[in-house]
Image: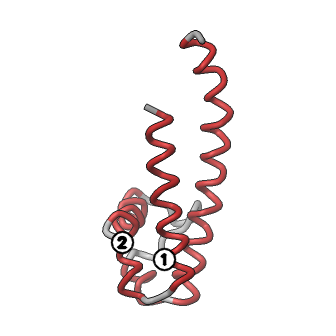
Amino acid sequence: MELETISIALFPVLFGMVLVWFVLVKLLFNRLEQAHPQTYEAMGRPSLFLRNSPAGVIAMLKFLVRREHRALSDGGLSKLSDAMLVFLAVYLVLFI
């Protein structure tokens, strides 16, 4: 298969993954805001669009990569966070 054909086929997959990522981030922020408001406040009350800032994105990525969800003892949040970390890794591999 040609590189150009692979690129054309990969574009809709990556675009779809971005949309899924937005949904996952929204779910994460909602869960943190509802169940762990102190952690949500410490992250700067991040939002998907309204209060979106580079600092909020960095705080979210640190939360995921450092696996800070473990300290919160929330099984649902842990599953979501771990799934997001795997999803991000897959996305980056496909993107590169």
User: Depth check: 92 or 33 in front?
Assistant: 92
The residue under label 1 is: 78
Q: Is residue 92 above or below residue 8?
A: below
Mark 2 Cα shell of 10 Å, populated few (<14), some (14-19), many (≥20):
some
The residue under label 2 is: 67
Q: Quadrant of residue 34?
A: bottom right
Residue 36: image location, x then y, percent? 48, 88
Q: Quadrant of residue 55?
A: bottom left
User: Depth check: 16 or 90 in front?
Assistant: 90
At x 36%, y 71%, the residue is: 67
At x 64%, y 20%, the residue is: 8
Mark 1 Cα shell of 10 Å, populated few (<14), some (14-19), many (≥20):
some
At x 36%, y 60%, the residue is: 58
Residue 49: image location, x then y, percent? 58, 60
**59 on left or right of 31:** left
Q: Is residue 41 above or below residue 7?
A: below
Q: Looking at numbered disc 2 in the image, what kind of residue is underneath it?
A: Arg
Q: Quadrant of the N terminus?
A: top right
**12 on left or right of 21:** right
Residue 86: image location, x then y, percent? 48, 56
Q: Looking at numbered disc 1 in the image, what kind of residue is underneath it?
A: Ser
Q: Quadrant of the C terminus?
A: top left
Residue 9: image location, x then y, percent? 66, 24
